[in-house]
Image (tube, helix red, strand yellow):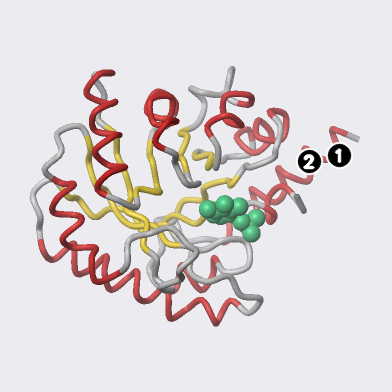
Amino acid sequence: MQDHKYEHIAGKVKAYINEIPRNVTVVAAAKKRDRGEIRAAIDAGIRIIGENYVQETEKVYPGLKDVAKWHLIGALQKNKVKKAVMMFDMIETVDSVELAGEIDKRCGGAGKIMPVLLEINTGLEGNKSGIIPEDVKDTAKTISAMKNIRIEGLMTMGPLADDPELSRPYFRIAQELFLELKGADIPGVEMKYLSMGMTASYRVAIAEGANLVRIGTGIFGER
Ligand SMILES: *Cc1c(COP(=O)(O)O)cnc(C)c1O
């Protein structure tokens, strides 16, 4: 039974890696998955694991910490920052100067420099986290002055929709911001990664410039 599940995961991983362009990397979105499932994905070729919660990550990553990169893709509470900076190789969900300041402070204490993505609220949704597009440039400038953080790109979810085409305008907004910031050449900001697209929408996201796609159910099955 377990073997069958792991084979399924391996097959999915290989199919995604085969399908997507070489410059795009699959982040396996692993919330609620156990260590065996995550191990199966890594063994099949996944190089980046995305986790939503610090506490869940602590449970699964002993033994796997060094065989993949770990990205935080869920909202980060201030009281979890200290742990998060020790555990993650990238924080994709920086959505305020305050949070960035806390990450900077904790990284300073740990002698670490944290690559981060700025999360953009492309849909201007009141209930969603993320920086609104018109504030992104100023926010990037402010955060870029922090010594222990390196901005390496942008991340967005966009409003969830059944039809992936409905995500396209939001992905395009993120891509335009990405290119604008890249062109702005802000010292300390290196626009390398655009993280967007999930199981239902990764193809549209790649067409709109994503080079990190976060895929959960497509790899691991229904949650
Ligand atoms: C769960 C999750 C994903 C993956 O979603 P699927 O629809 O399962 O592929 C991507 N990004 C974030 C931030 C998530 O929480």
State the mark number for residue 120.
none
Residue 180 located left or right of residue 195: left
Q: Is residue 17 visible?
A: no
Location of residue 199 by image quarter: bottom right
Query: Which residue is outermost to the right?
Result: 1
Q: Residue at x 24, y 38 (%)?
A: 101
Q: Nearer the viewer, residue 219 or 82?
A: 82
Viewer-side residue, 152 vs 26: 152
Number of labels in the image equals 2
Q: Position of residue 140 (x, y in %)?
A: 19, 54
Q: Quadrant of ligand 1?
A: bottom right
Query: Where residue 97 appears, x then y in whole percent?
Result: 24, 48
In the rendered image, which residue does mark 2 sit on? 7
Q: Is residue 138 visible?
A: yes
Residue at the (20%, 56%) spot, across then down: 139
Looking at the rendered structure, the secondary structure element under dot 2 is helix
Asked if the residues shown at circle 2 and circle 1 are in contact, with their CB atoms under 8 angstroms apart, the answer is: yes
> Residue 65: x percent and y percent?
51, 23
Q: Which residue is drawn at the image coordinates 54% and 65% (left, top)?
A: 202
Mark-to-mark CA distance, 2 and 1: 5 Å
Is residue 95 rendered to the left or right of residue 136?
A: right
Mark linked to residue 4: 1
Q: Residue at (15%, 46%) from the top-left corner?
A: 144
